[in-house]
Image: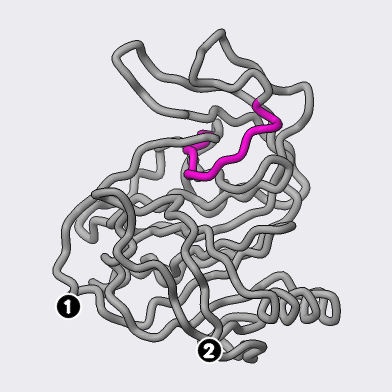
Amino acid sequence: MMATTHAHEHHDHGDTFAVHGMLLVVGDDRFYFSHLPMFSVVAHRFQVLLEIEFDDEVREALRADAKTTGGDLYTFAPRPFPLVELDPADGGPARTSLVGTIFHGHFERGGHPIARDATARIRRVAHYRPLDPEARHDDRAPLRYLCFGKAGDLFLAHEITARPDFDQVLKARMVPGSVQHAPDPQVPADVLAADFDLAVPVTVSRTDTPRHRLTAGETVDGTFLLGVSRTGAHEFNAQLKIDREIYMESGELT
C-alpha cells in the first residue's frame, strides 16, 4: 500500500458549507471523487481526492449508462456540507458519507441525472489540501500530478498549487519493465503490483502550464515521491502511458 503525507489547515465549518461538486472517477472496480475547486470562492479552495463506495443499485446504474453512452465524464452534486469535515487529520474525516445526485456529464453544464439520492460512503481520503488564494503560480516549476488508484487501474490528478492553474484528471498505467529505483525498504520490490491508496506525487520533466500538460496517447518518464524522512527522499522512476483524459478545467482556477 502506497502512502504519502497530507497538508492541513483549519477552517471554520461555516466557511466551507456549500454544494461541493465532485468529478466522479470510475475505475475497474473502485470509485473516486475529485472535488471541483475554485480559487474565487472560499468554500471551494481545496483539492480533495476520495475513494468512495456505492451500493449495488447505483453501481449498476453507472455501468449501464457507461455501456449505453460510452460516456467517461460523470459528476456528483451532494447535499450541502462543510468541506472541512473531509479533513483526514486526527485519525480520519468527521464525515463518512455524502448523499446526492450522479450526473452523466457536468452537473452545472448540461449533464443529466442518472441516480438521485445516491449515498457515497467514504472509504478513505486519498488527498486533502487547502489552496492559498494569494499565492501566484510559477510557470517554471516542474509539472506534477497526484497518482492514485489500484494496481493496473491508476489515475493522475494534476496537483493544483496557485492561481492561475488547471484541474485535470487522466487515466494512466505504468509501463512494465520501466520501473527503476535504488534499494529502499519504502519502495515495494514489485511497484507494478502496489496500490496507491493515498495519492503519491509524480513529477514530469516539463513545465507546469496547461500547454505542457499530459495528453492521451503519450508515454512520459515520471518520478514518484513516496515521502521524505531523515534518511532522505524515498522515490522511484517509471514510465507512464496516458490512456485518456477524463476531465480538464482552467477557467475556475484563474
Position above or below: 251 against 241: below
Task: Give whichever of 17, 93 is nearer the camera.
Answer: 93
Give the amino acid at mark 2: Asp
Q: Quadrant of the N terminus?
A: top right
- Circle 1: element type: helix
Task: Give whichever of 196, 57 is nearer the camera.
Answer: 57
| Pointers 1 and 2 in contact (C-beta within 8 Å) | no
Q: Earlier in the sequence, mark 1 or mark 2?
A: 1
User: Who's the residue at 35% across and 50% down the image?
Assistant: 161
User: Which residue ends up furthest to the right in the rendered image?
Assistant: 68
The segment highlighted magenta reads 191-203
Q: Which residue is mark 2?
A: 117
Assess whether residue 194 is covered by the magenta stretch.
yes
What is the CA distance from the residue labelled 1 to the residue labelled 2?
Answer: 24 Å
Is residue 176 found left or right of 123 in the rendered image? right
Give the amino acid at mark 1: Gly
Residue 36 picture location, percent across and down: 44, 69
User: Who's the residue at 55% across and 83% down the image?
Assistant: 118
